[in-house]
């Protein structure tokens, strides 16, 4: 029994490390995207696209580890004494709960990174007017809020915190407002070519979605830490473009 428990704990520690590495890579992608946009650096945007394979590889590995860990956790719950605990106490100590959360977090991080890559793919077409993310206040604010909301989710995950969730919601709502402003302002720019408008719109959608996925990670961390499901707890914020 001791050996089985030791193996299971070792697997979960490895999975935790992989999740942290994946989260840090996702944040690095967002930071690189910010630099590429503000510097009009298309080579850096192409580097973001190339780096996506690293995150995809971690997603596959985490998914496989999580599925194996779920099977082991089901068999080990009795050995670890989980069945003797009340439902209000079966939180982070339950390996089954952690394995299920790991799958959700992994998928959200992978999709978040996909949206960053999607924005980079649009940007390298070179049709967004140069200097837009540096000089346009709404576009600059939109980009900064994406960095903040993803950074909060990653810090919460790596440091096993859930206290940031209240503010991460507020930042995401700010992001939604800035995305809406970018969209509406682009509509009013008569000098903007249709292809340029379409690319700004696609980038805006990708950044907004990246923020939503970061919030999903925060929600899952709260559920893992407290057992409380807070998804869709506040649907009063306005929708994006």
Image (cartoon, grey):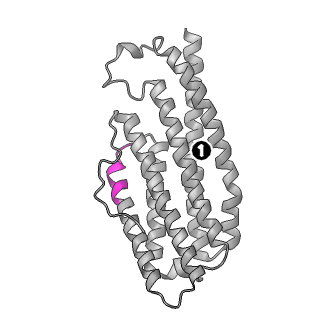
Tell which residue pokes out farthest to the top in this image: 1
Query: Going 34% across and 45% down the picture, which residue do you hit?
Result: 163
Q: Quadrant of residue 11?
A: top right
State whether residue 90 is above or below residue 237.
above
Q: Is residue 20 within the magenta segment? A: no
Left/right of residue 151 with respect to residue 32 in the rendered view: left
- 108 w.r.t. 117: above or below: above
Q: Is residue 15 above or below residue 215?
A: above
In screen coordinates, is 241 left or right of 69? left
Q: For mark 1, what is the residue? A: 21
Quadrant holding the C terminus = bottom left
- Check the image and name the residue furthest to the front: 194
Residue range of the region highlighted in magenta in the rendering = 161-170
Quarter placement of the N terminus: top right
The residue at the point 66 percent across, 74 percent down is 41
167 drawn magenta: yes
Q: Nearer the viewer, residue 19 or 110?
A: 110
Measuring from the top left, give residue 86's x and y in whole percent.
31, 19
Q: Residue 221 placed where, x, y %?
A: 42, 40
The location of residue 179, given as percent across then percent down, is 43, 70
Residue in view at x 68 percent, y 49 percent: 54
- Dot 1 falls on a residue whose secondary structure is helix
Q: Is residue 225 above or below residue 32?
A: above
Give the residue at x 70% y 66%. Answer: 46
Left or right of residue 95: residue 52? right
The quarter holding residue 45 reads bottom right
Residue furthest bottom as drawn: 191
The picture places residue 188, in percent across and down from the top left corner, at 43, 86
């Amino acid at each position: 029994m001791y050996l089985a428990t030791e193996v299971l704990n070792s697997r979960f520690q490895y999975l935790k490390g992989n999740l942290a590495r994946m989260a840090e890579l996702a944040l690095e992608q967002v930071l690189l995207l910010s630099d590429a946009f503000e510097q009009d650096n298309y080579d850096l945007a192409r580097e973001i696209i190339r780096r996506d394979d690293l995150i995809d590889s971690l997603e596959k590995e985490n998914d496989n580890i999580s599925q194996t860990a779920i099977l082991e956790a089901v068999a080990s719950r009795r050995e670890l004494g989980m069945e003797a605990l009340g439902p209000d106490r079966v939180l982070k100590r339950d390996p089954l709960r952690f394995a299920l959360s790991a799958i959700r977090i992994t998928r959200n991080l992978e999709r978040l990174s996909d949206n960053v890559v999607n924005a980079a793919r649009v940007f390298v077409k070179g049709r967004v007017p140069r200097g837009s993310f540096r000089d346009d206040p709404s576009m600059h604010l939109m980009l900064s809020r994406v960095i903040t909301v993803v950074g909060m989710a990653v810090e919460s995950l790596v440091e096993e915190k859930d206290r940031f969730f209240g503010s991460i919601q507020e930042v995401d709502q700010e992001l939604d407002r800035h995305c809406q402003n970018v969209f509406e302002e682009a509509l009013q720019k008569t000098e903007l070519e249709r292809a340029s408008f379409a690319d700004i719109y696609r980038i805006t959608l990708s950044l907004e979605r990246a923020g939503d996925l970061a919030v999903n990670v925060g929600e899952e961390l709260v559920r893992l830490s407290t057992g409380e499901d807070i998804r869709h707890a506040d649907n009063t914020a306005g929708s994006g473009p």
